[in-house]
Image (tube, rainbow, N blue to C red):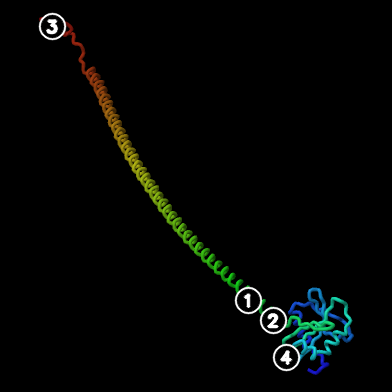
Amino acid sequence: MTRGYKPVVAIGEARRKAVIWGFMLIELVTKAKLPFDFVICDRECPSLVRIRRLKYSQYGVSDILRSCRQEIGELRALRIPEGIYRELWVRGPDRAWHRYLILDGSIEVLENEESWQDEENEENRQEHKNEESRLVEGNEENRKNNENEKTRQVNENEDNRKGDGNEKTRQVNGNEDNRKNDGNENSRQINENEDNRKGDGNEKTRQVNENEDNRKGDGNENSRQVNENEDNRKNDVNEDNRKELGNEEKRQEENVPAVIPAFDKPVAE
């Protein structure tokens, strides 16, 4: 890049990287021209960060002192209180970032992006392992849940089968009860018919007896009538006899001759 051209794209990328790497960005609202591009805070230690892009991949301390001497000089010229640090972030052609701590008499190499990438890769590997463990645990839990679900399904099917068996048993018992009730009803009907038949027989017997009584009564009535007629006939005969006797007596009285004097005395022997 041409010296003096402000790497706006790299600055924006560096800010995003800072957030990704866990640094807190501090915004400075000022129109003054500052020899740094942004401020970060790491573990309550603020740092002034300057950004530089390089076209070649030489990131040794001597290489940086030679390639970035202007940026390093501007950072060292800042009068800052103790506890605030100066950092130079350099992005190479491979888009890898390198961090340097700028001291008054020297510079130190901080963790570069490769280290961060290694740590990030290690974290990713660990996270991947954890994810695999979680997946294995999740699969194991799902398998157990599936087994439990199958067990519940089997138990539910067994309960349904038992329920169906109980329902069939209840149905059979219900049918048996209905059959017994029908048998009892038929028995009651037969008994009722038998009672009705006996009642009809008794009624017929009573009717026959009543007819026999009526017949006997009629016979007795006829006998009484005959006897009464016979008595009447006898009475009539007796009456006729009495009348005839009376008439005969009258006739005899009428036919008695007058007393003959000659026969007043008895005839001598």
Kind of residue at disc 3: Val
**Which badge, 3 or 4, is on the more N-terminal residue?**
4
Per the model, the C-alpha gap separating discs 4 and 1 is: 32 Å
SS of the residue under disc 4: loop
Q: Residues within 10 Å of mark 4 (few under 14, many from 20)?
A: few
State the separation of the CA atoms marked 2 and 1.
15 Å
For marks 3 and 4, give the one nearer the viewer: 4
- Badge 1 marks a residue whose secondary structure is helix
Instruction: Decide which of tag 2 and tag 4 comes sooner along the chain.
Output: 4
Q: Are marks 4 and 1 in contact (CB under 8 Å)?
A: no
Q: Which of marks 2 and 1 is nearer the N terminus?
A: 2
Q: Residues within 10 Å of mark 3 (few under 14, many from 20)?
A: few
> Which residue position holds label 2?
117
Tell me the element at label 2. helix
**Disc 2 or disc 3, which is closer to the eye?**
2
Marks 2/4: CA–CA distance:
18 Å
